[in-house]
Image: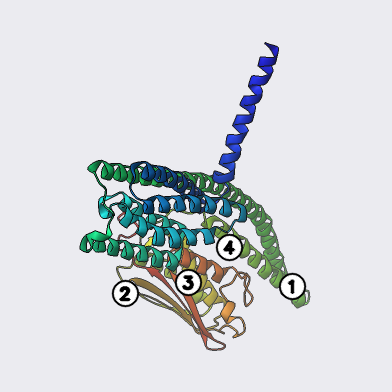
Amino acid sequence: MAKIKNVMPDKTIKSTPSLKRFINLFFAAHLEFRVRLFHVLAMGGTIISFAMCIVSAVNYIGNTQVLINALLTVLSFSLLMYSRRSGRYQICYMITIIVIFLGLFPALFFSSGGYHGGMMAFFIFAVVFTVFMLEGKKAIIFSAAEVLLYTFLCISAYLRPEWVNRFESEQGVLIDVVIGFVTVSVILGVCLYLHFRLYNAQQRQLDEQNAILAQANRAKTEFLANASHEMRTPLTVTSVNVQVVMRMLEDMGENLRDPEARELLENAQSEIMRLSRMVGGMLTLASMSEDTDRHKLDYTALVKSGVEMLRLTLAEQGIALEADIADGLIVFGNADLLAQVLTNLLQNARAHTKNGAVTVNAKKHGAEITVTVRDTGSGIPREILPNVFERGVSTGGTGFGLFLCKTVAESHGGRIWIESEPGAGTEVNYSLPVYEGQFGGEEL
C-alpha cells in the first residue's frame, strides 16, 4: 500500500506540468495575439487535414484529395514547429497565405465538390485569417486577391462543371459541408475567444495603470496646491513688509531718503510679485488635467467681463482699451480656464505697453471663434518669437503665461498663434470651436 501511495501522486505531478508546458509553449500570455492565433490555425490545420486525409481514403473520394490533405497535414505541422523554434512568424504567415490559401485551397475546391462542398467555409476563414495576420496595405492586397480568386473559382466551377470532382452521394456532400462548417466555426471561435480575452486583459491592465496614474496625479496636484498656499503666505508677508518700508522711506525727509535703497526695494517687490505669479501658474497647470468642469458657455459675456475687469488697471497706466466683441458667441469649456487665457494676454499687453493702446476683438469665423489681443507695445524679440509658447521662455515675466494660454486653448480643441514686430507691438490670436451640440453640453 505504501508503494501505491508513492507512485500515484508522481503520475499526477508529471501530467499537470506537461499540460502547462504545452500551454505556455504555444498560448502563453506574453505571446503576441497573432502568434497564438497562428498556433491555433496550424494545430487545427494539422488535425483537420489529417482527419480529411483518412476520410478521403476510406470513402475513396479520390487520390488527388488524399494527396492534397496529406500535403496540408505535413505543411501545417512543419510551419507550426518551424515558427515556434525560429520565431520567424511573418515568413510563416506569408507561406500559409500564398501556398495554402492561394495554392492548395483552389485545388481542394475542384477536387472536393466545388461550391457544393465545404470549401466555401474555408474560403471565408482564409480571408479572415489574412486580415488578422497581416497589416496595412499588405492585408488589403492579399485579402482582396483571395476574394477575387475565390469568386473566380466559383464562376469557373459553374461554367466548367467538368473541372469539378463531385461527390458520389448526398451523404458525401453533407459530411464535407458539416466538417467544413464545424472546423471553421471552432477555429474562428477560438480565435475570437483569444482576441477578446487578450483585449479584456489589456483593458484591465490599462484601467489599473490609469487608476495608478490618476492617484499619482492627484497626489502631485495636492502637493503643489499645499506648496503653493504655503509659499503664498510668506510671499504676501514679505511683500507687505517691503511696501511698509517703502512708505517709511517716503515719510523721511529729503536729506534722509536713500534713492538706492528705494530702488532695491522696488526690485525686490517686483521679484516677489513675479514669484507669486509663477506659483499661481504652476498650480493652474497642475490642476488642469483634473479639471473636467466644462459647460456650454456664453463666450460673449465671458470676454466682455474679462475686458471690463482690466479696463481700469490699464487706464491707470495710460493704456487705452478698445473692444469689439460679437454677440451670440457660444463655446463649450471651463469658464475659469478660458477667462485666465484672456487675462494673461491682457496682462502681457499691459506689461509691454506704455501710454499706448490695446485692442480686443472676438468674432465668429465659420466653425471657430477667434479672439485677437493686439497692443502697440515693445513687441517680442525675433530670436525668441518661434519658441514663445514654450514653458520658461519669457521676455522678463514668469515664462508660464503664454504656455498656459496654449495649453488651455489646445485642451479645448482650439489653437493659438502670435505675430510681433520689435517696437511695433504684438498680436495674439486664439481660436475655439463653436458649440453646436457636439459635446453634449447642457443648455444655458
The image position of residue 124, as x and y in percent, is 34, 54
Mark-to-mark CA distance, 2 and 3: 33 Å
Q: Earlier in the sequence, mark 3 or mark 1?
A: 1
Q: Are marks 2 and 1 in contact (CB under 8 Å)?
A: no
Badge 3 element: helix
**Which residue has dot 4 on it?**
281
Question: Which sits earlier in the primary sequence, circle 2 or circle 4?
Answer: 4
Q: CA distance from mark 2 to mark 1?
A: 52 Å
In which quadrant is the C terminus drawn? bottom left
Q: Earlier in the sequence, mark 2 or mark 3?
A: 3
What residue would you read off at disc 1?
264
Asked whether the viewer can see residue 333, the reply is no
Find disc 3 in the rendering and name its residue. 312
Q: Residue at x 62, y 75 (%)?
A: 394
Mark 4 and mark 1: Cα distance apart in space: 26 Å
User: Residue 167: where, in percent of width, then height?
Assistant: 27, 48
State the image coordinates of residue 99 (x, y, percent, origin top left). Answer: 45, 61
- 10 Å crowding of disc 3: few (<14), some (14-19), many (20+): some
- Residue type, mark 1 in image: Leu
Under circle 2, the secondary element is: loop
Q: Which residue is mark 2?
A: 366
241, above or below 390, in the image: above
Mark 4 vs mark 1: give the one in front: 4
